[in-house]
Image (cartoon, rainbow, N blue to C red):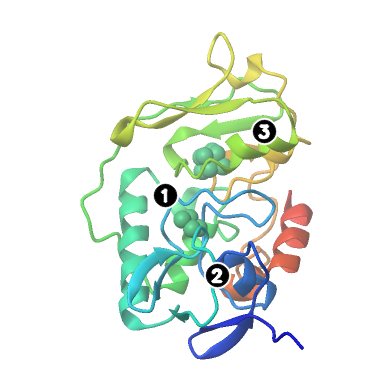
């Protein structure tokens, strides 16, 4: 009789299947590992590093690290949470994330993770970049100031919508989200509010028009439940669709 393959996360046994990453198996077992650029509906991307865990003492991204028999994963020590908080602080100062005025406030994964990791201040000096807002589309708007380059819209538009509306241009610190149209404007693409790419942004960079602040404070996605409770796989998908 073959035994189930398992590893541990903070001492808890997690079963896994061949081909699973640590994130795949943990989410299936409803063990939350913080993540931003990962979405279980898409291939892992491994860019935000917020899912950092320590595996047998070595720091890895849980969304790209293959699961293996007997691994001991630290997902909750103070050192790991401190590193995640530092990564989030860097993301906050790299763009212009003004939570109190943002339409996504209360339903933003970046903001919710900041709360989850106990981030009280940005800590680093703000870059205060001056980026465009593209309101050329009749139904959707993009505020590039809030983009964290997770590439979820790129993957969704390419892999599910089959439209390739988005791409990443530049390299390294000059990387930026670009629109694939001759004018570079969203209004000159076939992007639609029903597209998966229109509903997947974890922050307030891609938003529907005419619906800002439609849910009162106190009734938004992360107002009553913290992100670790909301973001298990099933709930993750359902609530995303509902808020879409
Ligand atoms: Fe990610 Fe949103 Fe930026 Fe697209 S617009 S790369 S989904 S943060
Ligand atoms: Fe793993 Fe972003 S969630 S690197």
Q: From this view, report whether residue 119 is shown above or below residue 155.
A: below
- Marks 1/2 in contact by CB < 8 Å: the verdict is no
Which element carries disc 3, helix, strand or loop?
helix
Q: Is residue 183 left or right of residue 27?
A: left
Q: Quadrant of the N terminus?
A: bottom right
Q: From this view, report whether residue 226 is shown above or below residue 129.
A: below
Q: Residues within 10 Å of mark 3 (few under 14, many from 20)?
A: many
Q: Residues within 10 Å of mark 1 (few under 14, many from 20)?
A: few
Tell me which residue sits at (52%, 60%) in the image: 63
Residue that carries the numbered disc 1 in the rendered image = 98
Q: On residue 67, which mark appears? A: 2
Can you see residue 210? no
Q: Position of residue 82 (x, y in %)?
A: 31, 73
Residue that carries the numbered disc 3 in the rendered image = 157
Tell me which residue sits at (37%, 32%) in the image: 175
Q: On residue 232, which mark appears? A: none
């Amino acid at each position: 009789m073959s035994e189930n393959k398992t590893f541990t996360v903070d001492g808890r046994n997690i079963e896994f299947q061949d081909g699973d990453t640590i994130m795949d198996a943990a989410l299936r077992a409803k063990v939350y590992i913080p993540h931003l650029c990962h979405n279980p509906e898409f291939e892992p991307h491994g860019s935000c590093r917020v899912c950092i865990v320590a595996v047998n003492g070595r720091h890895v991204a849980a969304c790209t690290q293959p699961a293996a028999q007997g691994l001991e994963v630290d997902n909750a020590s103070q050192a790991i949470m401190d590193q995640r908080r530092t990564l989030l602080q860097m993301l906050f100062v790299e763009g212009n994330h003004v939570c109190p005025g943002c339409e996504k406030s209360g339903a933003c994964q970046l903001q919710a993770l900041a709360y989850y990791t106990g981030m009280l201040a940005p800590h680093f000096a703000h870059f205060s970049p001056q980026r465009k807002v593209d309101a050329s589309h009749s139904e959707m708007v993009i505020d590039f100031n809030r983009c964290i380059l997770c590439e979820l819209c790129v993957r969704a538009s390419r892999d599910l919508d089959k439209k390739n509306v988005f791409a990443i241009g530049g390299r390294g610190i000059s990387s930026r989200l670009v629109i694939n149209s001759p004018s570079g404007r969203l209004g000159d693409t076939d992007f639609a509010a029903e597209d998966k790419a229109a509903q997947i942004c974890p922050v307030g960079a891609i938003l529907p028009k005419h619906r800002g602040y439609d849910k009162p404070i106190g009734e938004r996605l992360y107002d009553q439940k913290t992100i670790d409770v909301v973001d298990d796989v099933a709930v993750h998908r359902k609530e995303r669709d509902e808020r879409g």
